[in-house]
Image (cartoon, rainbow, N blue to C red):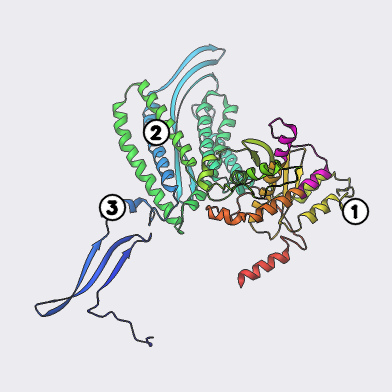
Amino acid sequence: MSTSGEYAQVKDDHPFEIKEINQSGKLIATYIHSHTTSNGEESDRIDVDIAKGPSTWVMSIVGAFMPVGYPDSVTDDYTAYQFYDSIQAFASTIAGLLASRAVLQVDTEIVVSDVKGYAITFRVFIATKTCSTSSQSGTRHYSSTYFYIWLGVRSNRLPGLGVGDSTASATGAVLLNVLQESAGRIATILFAHRLGSALEPECKKYRLMADIFNDAAMILDCVSPAFPKVPRVILLSVSSICKSLCGVAAGSSKASLSAHFAKQGNLAELNAKDASQETLISLLGMLVGTFVVSRISSQLATWTALIALLSVHLGTNYLAVRSVTMRTLNRQRANLVISSLISGVIKEEARYVGKPQHPTQHPEISLPSPKDVSLQELIFESDGAIRIQGAILAHCKVGVSLQEILSSISHPTISGSYQESKSKFSPGTSITMDLYNIFKKQGYIMWYDQRRNTFLVALKAYAPPIVQFDAWFHAVWAVTAMATATETATGTGRKSMMKMNSVEVRNWMEESLGAACAYRDRVDMYSLLRSKGWDLDTPAIEVWAGSRLAIPWGKGSEEEGNEEEEMERK
């Protein structure tokens, strides 16, 4: 062992190698040191062996637009997403140039009839407009182009708002703008408050919805001139609301997608390179668009090219979202994974109901990977739906208040309290207390509301994020077991839910919980999910700002939470 001030040295006559790698761990070059003797003189020699791969200038170009360490520093779906995103931006830029020329050439209004100051018109128009949204990568501009034909009624007595009206004033135009801006900003606050918790779990859905909101705003802007003054103000205000919803949905969902793509803590750099890619694509689109505009002159050719480009723009936007493979388990992905996991088991057990001999081995476990699920999931899914073989049999709400569960079990009295009859299972206690005891070791309490065909899940305070998945697993297990039993009992081949009273629901909750927990522990479900690449540490099932139950003991209690924190500190 060397002492302080001493350094290990390599002998001059001992050759050695130094390997140079990039941040992804790939070999760039190898430096080989050797000791040589020539004409009685000794010298050191260093040979450089450059690893085979893309040329230096190609790597420099890629490095200017891709994150450092690409493709190892990003997820596998990043390339496909950026490919479709680049195509849609390219098509949108060319379409914008065509529309910019067309809007100067085509603004045709054919008056079909003019009766008492009101003209029935047939109008052809092409317009383009840009909507700006903010995200972590800065301000993004969404350019949308519209070609529309409408049959409308125009009043010859009502000029534009603040333009062309001798009685209108600049103040009136300003007040109109204030009204639109106020409506949009209020909508931003309400939308963020109401759906803020859902933007990250459902980022693919809201990323596409942002384009829909933006398109709706453009359509309202385009058709507003065909209406009288008051309806026009309403349409413009609704348009401002849609633009605000676009800004919130696009910025938040884009931030979630960027966080998903970044694997090595390179979120800021990924956003910066994304902005560089958008700039390059827009520049190329303008250059190609200039050539296209110079070659296309007739109106028919212009409209044909424009519609084709817009179709490419919308289609590639959809494909870009579909190409993303999320690793978090939101409600729909959890449903697909759990259904695939337990459907075979429950069917096998249903075959042995009432028979003395039960199966000794369960069917082989088939657990889909995130890639498999991404090919099955829908962009727009019914809120909280529990699907079995494609059919929606029930719904589930996670994060409800205890009062909502009590309202489903019993009705409130005049004083606001809830009066329940005694339970048949535990003398001296109510069904609510039965539920408390049944779910004492769980991080949640669940009840089935038959009137709404919905499972209500109240989460306990200090419970870990995995509890949300446990509750969803329990709900899907319960629905699958009942649907399979109903299908077997009726012999109709159709799955459905049975009608039950409160006592039967309570019994169903207890039996399904025991079976679900036993199977979950037997197959070591958490390890299986993680081995497939699923992220169980990020809660993505609760999409509403719900409440928590602070209980004195049991799973999810403050005492257990303190114990977990103490173990983490140790």
Report how far apart the C-alphas of labels 2 and 3 lie in the structure.
36 Å
Query: Which amino acid type is shown beneath numbered disc 3?
Result: Pro
Instruction: Based on the picture, tell me whether residue 487 belongs to the magenta stretch.
Output: yes
Left or right of 111? Residue 353 is right
Magenta stretch?
482-510
Which mark's residue is nearer the viewer, 1 or 3?
1
Which secondary structure lies at badge 3?
loop
Separation of disc 1 and disc 3 at Cα?
77 Å
| Tag shown at residue 96 | 2
The quarter of the rendered structure image containing the C terminus is bottom right
Please give the name of the residue rendered at 79% of the width and 44% of the height, measured from the top-left corner. 505
Q: Which residue is mark 1?
A: 427
> Is residue 382 rendered to the left or right of residue 15?
right
The x and y percentages for residue 543 are 63, 47
Closer-to-camera residue (187/369): 369
Q: Is residue 166 among the parts visible in the rendering?
A: no
The residue tagged 3 is 54
Left or right: 83, with 9 as reference point:
right
> Counting residues from the N terminus, which is met first, the one under dot 1 or under dot 2?
2
Residue type of the residue flagged with mark 1: Pro
Secondary structure found at label 2: helix
Q: How many marks?
A: 3
Q: In the image, which is nearer the foreground, mark 1 or mark 2?
A: 1
- Residue 85 in the magenta stretch? The answer is no
Do callouts 1 and 3 mark residues in contact (Cβ within 8 Å)? no
Element assignment for label 1: loop
